[in-house]
Image: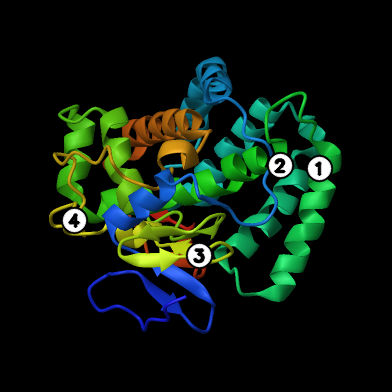
Amino acid sequence: MVVQSASTNGAPYYDRTARTWVLSRYADVLAALREPRLCLTGHAEAQPERSQFKELAVACMPRMKPLAERMLRDLPLDRPVDLVGEFAEPWCLELAVLVCGVDSGQKHRLFDLARAISAAAAEPRDQAMGERARDAQAQMGRFLQPAIVPMPVPTFVALSQTLPCLLANAWLALFEHPGEMARLRSGQTPVPNAIEELLRYAKIPRKVSRRVTADVELGGAKLVEGDVVRLMIALANRDGAHFPDPDRLDFSRNAGGQLSLGAGAHSCVGGPLIRMAAAMATSAFLQHFGAAQLAGPVEWRGGAGFRSPARLFISNH
């Protein structure tokens, strides 16, 4: 193995402290995601057919749309509203309950367990959080049955925890880019089309890890069997060589190549469900609160894995 120092031009380098190769350029990360000689680190469940999650999305969304509209319509207009705690989290929890076939009496218990798993993913270096996450995953496994939905534990965590974080970051970006918000509200840009750019911009996840199963060269780095590779998804999505003016939210750009949901064989099997849910929740939010403004500072949570607003207060006044 050739040991390198941190790169100043985005080229792959070896992090001596973490004993990990780091890839951050868009072209390198995309190639790594498509490379069959790189696999998920740790134990991974068998991947279901992507069509299964697309069918779930088609089946669930008609029931979730009226729920989103009702929840937003019932929110008070005489005080600041927390979009995360009062809409995104409860709506996404109901989606997770519906998709995973969970008894509604268990949903809050499962939400707390999923929160522990998500917190550990956000702070991957915290050993105590990691222990709590492993215990929570074991407990969730006893509640959720694979016969009902593929990959039940990661599916419930993704829908009840990761999706609200994605929505919170995406909606904050809209408030910070009022021109793009106006394009969505006017219909100039269809919301489903805008979701790709919001996925690119939202920085969830920030990074993922892969293990090398056979020697391979990526971006000029010679990786050998057993090496661990960290793919910096958020940095790749902000690579100016692929996305001009990458730190600006721009619905006119073609963001179809964003990597937040992976690529190739390593693309997220739940991608169709995530995209459909994000578009539906965002459309409902724009309809009811698109003219609102941020009310107060943003409260953040998370860490090196990902960060998102813990609270996102807005006001129509």
The answer to which image quadrant residue 90 occupies is: top right
Image position of 244 (left or right of 281): left
Between circles 4 and 2, the one closer to the viewer is 2
Circle 4 sits on which residue?
Answer: 248
Label 3: which residue? 224
The three-letter amino acid code for the residue at tag 3 is Val
Number of the front mark, 1 or 4: 1
Residue 90 visible in the displayed image: no
Graded by Cα atoms within 10 Å as few (under 14), some (14 to 19) or many (20 or more), the crowding at tag 2 reads many
Mark 2 or 3 closer to N-term? 2
The residue under label 1 is 141
Where residue 12 sits: x, y (%)?
Answer: 34, 69
Sequence-wise, which precedes: disc 2 or disc 1? 1
Q: Of the residues under marks 1 and 3, which one precedes in the sequence?
A: 1
Q: Nearer the viewer, mark 1 or mark 3?
A: 3
Secondary structure under tag 4 reads loop
Q: Are marks 1 and 3 in contact (CB under 8 Å)?
A: no
| Camera-side residue of 35 and 18 | 35
Write the residue at 16% across / 57% down: 241
Marks 2 and 1 close (CB-CB < 8 Å): yes
Q: Secondary structure at mark 3?
A: loop
Residue 153 numbered tag: 2
Q: CA distance from mark 1 to mark 4?
A: 41 Å
Q: Which of the two discs, 4 and 3, labels the residue nearer the N terminus?
A: 3
Instruction: Kindly check if marks 1 and 4 are in contact, taking CB atoms under 8 A apart as contact.
Output: no
- The answer to which of marks 1 and 4 sits earlier in the sequence is 1
In this rendering, would 86 be left or right of 251? right
Secondary element at image label 2: helix
Q: Is residue 211 above or below residue 158?
A: below
Distance CA(mark 4)–CA(mark 2): 35 Å
For residue 159, above or below residue 125: above
Q: Amino acid at mark 2?
A: Val
